[in-house]
Amino acid sequence: MQGHSVTGTGPRTGTWKLAHARSLADPAGFWAEAAAAVDWTRPWERVLDDSAAPFYRWFAGAELNTCHNAVDRHVARGRGEQPAIIHDSPVTGSITSISYGALLDRVARVAGALRDLGVGKGDRVIVYMPMVPEAAIAMLACARIGAVHSVVFGGFSARELATRIDDAKPKVLVAGSCGIEPNRVVAYKPLLDEAIAQAHHKPQYCVILQREQQRAELSPGRDLDWAELEAAAEPADCVPVAATDPLYILYTSGTTGQPKGVVRDNGGHAVAMTWSMRHVYGMEPGEVFWSASDVGWVVGHSYIVYAPLLHGSTTVMYEGKPVGTPDAGAFWRVIQQHKVAVLFTAPTAFRAIKRDDPEGTHVARYDTSSLRALFLAGERCDPNTLDWAGEILGVPVVDHWWQTETGWAIAANCLGLERLPIKPGSPTKPVPGYDVQVLCDDGEPVAPGAIGRIMIRLPLPPGCLPTLWGNDERFRASYLAAEPGYYLSGDAGYFDDQGYLYVMSRIDDIINVAGHRLSTGGMEAVLAGHPDVAECAVIGVADQLKGELPLGLVVLKAGVSRPDADITRELVAKVRDEIGPVAAFKTVLVVPRLPKTRSGKILRGTMKHIAEGTEYRMPATIDDPAILEEIQAAFADAGYAQTR
Ligand code: COA
Ligand code: AMP
């Protein structure tokens, strides 16, 4: 292992403080300056339009095209030969490089093909694709003609896809014929057909990218072959859109089974993405950025596709896993082969590598000297993982905190501004643009060290969600109603006495499984739909690899005499079928009763403590303490820890 230090300040001490203070004192001036890095076809009338507060709009009156900024302008300014996308796919044994020039050609044709199918400004297109360059091409093609894309992660079920089809009402669906997991080929087409059958809204066309690993049978009249369309289409030009027009919708778990359609605008997004590449990640145009995530998540939208391309960097699209494709040295091989300057992934990926190669022996087989920093996000990063990653790679490891809603980091160690000392367990300090406050239940700021709700004083900076798709009211109720003038992040945590933020847990029913955000309420709704289930609860239990894993508890209806094992097997299959394999829902326990408060609220938090073997206090409002003994016995039988 190489020795290294991840602490110590850089030469520009005080830069973060100045930038952060200025961004809050003069947001319009700060972001107008940042906006100079973007090409506009029409200037803004107001940098920050607060006329409909608490709904804010950035760069009102301006026009631009995001695809032009991400592709065309780089070709025009001499980057035509530079790789834009490197698709590195150990699961298919291929590496493909697409230059900015070639990307422009392909995106313009696919945009032309979509236009010929009747897709225009404001129309929605759902993209259900694995990690192939065509996913990015489809997104950029939509942006080019002013259409709004909504990418759905391939690990979601037909039912989840159907919910999104009904909410976004796409004219066209773009899909791959299959995705490739290390242990199986996942046929997407049957899922797509099933989703369209379930949905009330029917898209007019499906454009299918045929992959050799499993070609799909096309339905005549509705399904079209991507390759044929791309080859035949006339290229389409970029269409200027309003800065405030939506670029995409990305659905994320809410506290009900109905996902929230997070909207991203064009102008604020382009400005924030571009600014973040240099100032948060310390990237220069022309360098290689690798976000080991999936285009179906926000990390993939922002840091596989838009930010690196807007900045003129090269982005790596990796279709593989951190381990098993072929081994725990896969990440180091990619860094060496493509000279990656900055790697971004979720802590769970490093936990997986550490599990397979605890001494980090694979690193010595590769030259990782191009790597300057590792950024981690998506879930709380345990200090062990952060320290281990720093030790084996010998570069600063930056934990940063953000969410689908914001689209970019809320708190980070902004290496491009100033390298602050790293404190493992903390994503460092608020990023310029974010006025982060920790408030207690009565709305007052809490003292350093005390846990409270993490909130962001409005306005949110450019790039953050302006609203939820077609649902201003849900946006207001979910995020703005808790405290007037603040955005509710849904996370709880604290500031220490040096202003470092610690993000500790969610205040709602969201859990984080391998960096994937899931709603336990959504899983409970699936379990409750089983005919033998009277009552149920799903809790997230700490897991060494995935951070958290869901655990189901069900009470069966009186008179049910079928073996428990049959019912639990059906319940596991039902969640996999209705939510998707990505939920990693594998365990359900049948219990006689669920512990509740006297008012009937299920004590999920107490059960979580019992399952994790952490200290808990008997809730004063518990209806019948004896039930906890039964729960403890059920957990013990199933091999879960138990203390008191
Ligand atoms: N299409 C279809 N199925 C998918 C899928 C996709 N795009 N992505 C995952 N799945 C399936 C997996 O095959 C697995 O199915 P299984 O139950 O049959 O094994 C299930 O969903 C769970 O997948 P995953 O969470 O990826 O777990 P894993 O055990 O396969 O791998 C890790 C564990 C840690 C290696 C993996 O989660 C990983 O690489 N994480 C990296 C971090 C990351 O991408 N975070 C995203 C946000 S930044
Ligand atoms: P998502 O919207 O899928 O990106 O998930 C966002 C949620 O993941 C946040 O609200 C947090 O609960 C959690 N999260 C993301 N990054 C971090 C981090 N660095 N530290 C702690 N929690 C995080």
Image: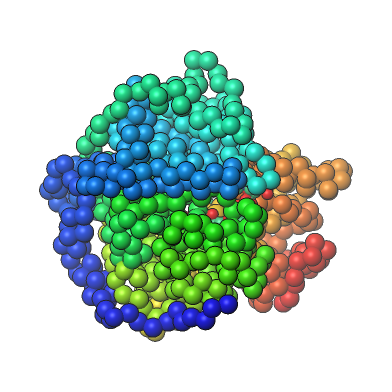
Which is nearer the eye, 127 or 85? Answer: 85
Q: Quadrant of residue 557?
A: top right
| Snapshot quadrant of residue 542 | bottom right
Point 53% across, 41% down: residue: 130
Quarter of the image where one finds residue 148 = top left
Quadrant (top left/top right/bottom left/bottom right) for the N terminus: bottom right
Look at 72% across and 77% down and name the residue there: 644
- Which one is nearer the viewer's eye here, 45 or 4? 4
Q: Nearer the viewer, residue 616 or 311?
A: 311
Q: How many marks?
A: 0
Q: Residue at x 72, y 42 (%)?
A: 573
Q: Residue furthest top?
A: 221
Give residue 401's position: percent from left, percent from top: 43, 65
Horizontal relation, residue 422 to residue 616: left or right:
left
Q: Is residue 267 visible?
A: yes
For the point 54% across and 46% down, the residue is 89
**Horizontally, is 61 left or right of 528 in the view?**
left
Give the x, y percent position of residue 277: 33, 60
Q: Residue 507's spot in the image, x, y percent? A: 51, 63
Q: Is residue 198 visible?
A: no
Residue 115: give x, y in percent of width and height. 33, 25
